[in-house]
Amino acid sequence: MREEARTMVATRSTTSRRCLTWWWLACCCFVSWVASSSWTAAACVAVTSLPGFDGPLPFSLETGYVEVNESTGVQLFYYFVSNIIFVDSPVGAGFSYAATEEGSKSSDTNAVKQLLIFLRKWLHDHPRFSLNPLYIGGDSYSGMIVPTLTLAIDESNGSEEKPFFNLKGYIAGNPVTDYKIDEDGRIPFLHGMGLISDELYEHAKETCGEKYSAPSNAQCAHSVQAINDCTKDINRGHILEPLCEELQSPIHNTAARDVMSRLMLESRPAAADDDIIIFECRKASRVLLKIWANDETVRESLGVQKGTVGEWKRCNRDIDYNSDVRSTVEYHLTLMRKGYRAIIYSGDHDSRVPSISTQAWIRLLNLSIADDWRPWYVDGQVAGFTRSYASNNLTYATVKGAGHTAAEYKPKECQEMFARWISGTPL
């Protein structure tokens, strides 16, 4: 690894209202750990092997905890993989925990404050990376956190707080941005995808005045309900995929669960047994992840402290969380005016945060178009469509065939998109 290499810091996050996905912060390169008397040094572990993978890991992995609130004992767990740091945030997500009941409560604002403290402490204990370019990023609900945190870091640079962050920009995928705008784009998206009739759409459009998030009259409410009833069995994350809601629950058959756990941890091919799991459903991998993450051998390998977290959940809906940021449109506008680079992207089959909604709030920024709508390619094939604004400070892109979130469906295309953007190469 070279020090010049960029590092991603990402955060995994969950609330009682919804399942949050990844936040990223991009910074630096390989680790040099330094303790300090003025700070509580991060407790970190070098992970060289993991159950389910034969031989040593082909990449560098450090895990650890950073205390971000001494009075309530909030410890954020992180993974540092080559150029990426993933942070389990807010407290209660992943392996992050609090020593007190008060510390287990969180909000958008509080999560941002804790992540800022995390970054300060992590860079203080890893000073080798302090001058490297820093990017903030994430997907889904992290759309409420990424621009808020990016602006908080910018404001920190203008204060006396140390260290100084070499902040360059941010990334947001399928981002929740403004509750009203996001919801208002859902019905036009469903109509455009041929999932509701022209008559149903036109009646809703007329009675609601294109504002569907909070029906203002009985006719509008009736139209919205009719649309919801019509599409209730559609997979909102990806409208072309099966719903597979039954896979949200763990595998109930104890014997099947034990077999699957053994197969995973022994690196053997999993049997195609429908009694064990339905592999055609994308959520199958999430069930497997839950089995793996709750294995004691895995936890020991990752350096997870015993007794801190009970059952690992991909979406911990029991977190006491307050969504106190309702819109981040103004945050984006402020960051654009300050000259930070950004890329916003959408899976074009996502009806949770439709591309129509994302493009709607981008238009509110009133930025001049630098490079108009055109296809972008990977391996000679159209990977999506893109447009750049304001002398290329902001790039918007769709990912063709992807859902919520895009990288889960099209990892190759998203990796290529990110690599081009961060290097300054047009998509």
Image (tube, rainbow, N blue to C red):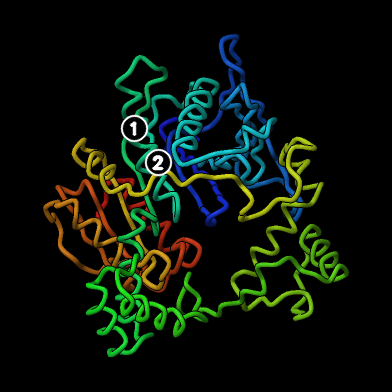
Q: Position of residue 127 (x, y in %)?
A: 49, 21
Instruction: Please report the residue visible at 58 percent of the width from the left and 12 percent of the height from the top.
Output: 36
Callout 1: 10 Å neighbours few (<14), some, many (20+)?
many
User: Where 177 sits versus 341, above or below?
Assistant: below
Q: Position of residue 29 (x, y in %)?
A: 48, 33
Q: Are marks 2 and 1 in contact (CB under 8 Å)?
A: yes
User: Where 75 sits versus 193, above or below?
Assistant: above
Instruction: Specify the farthest residue to the front.
Output: 218
Front one among 301 and 327: 327
**For numbered disc 2, what is the local secondary structure?**
strand
Dot label at residue 107 = none
Tell me which amino acid carries mark 1: Leu
Instruction: Specify the farthest residue to the top.
Output: 37
Is residue 158 something one can see in this rendering? yes
The part of the image, by quadrant, that contains residue 244 is bottom right
Q: Position of residue 212 (x, y in %)?
A: 32, 70
Residue corresponding to mark 1: 167
User: How far apart in space, not on screen, are marks 2 and 1 (Cα)?
Assistant: 8 Å
Instruction: Please report the residue visible at 19 percent of the width from the left and 66 percent of the height from the top.
Output: 373
Instruction: Please report the residue visible at 78 percent of the width from the left and 41 percent of the height from the top.
Output: 300
Q: The C terminus appears in which quarter of the rendering?
A: bottom left
Instruction: Please report the residue visible at 30 percent of the width from the left and 73 percent of the height from the top.
Output: 217
Is residue 378 something one can see in this rendering? no
Dot label at residue 136 = 2
Tell me which amino acid carries mark 2: Ile
Callout 2: 10 Å neighbours few (<14), some, many (20+)?
many
Q: First in sequence, mark 2 or 1: give its number.
A: 2
Front one among 310 and 138: 310
Side (left or right) of 202 relative to 271: left
**For numbered disc 1, what is the local secondary structure?**
strand
The part of the image, by quadrant, that contains residue 43 is top right
User: Where 66 sits versus 172, above or below?
Assistant: above
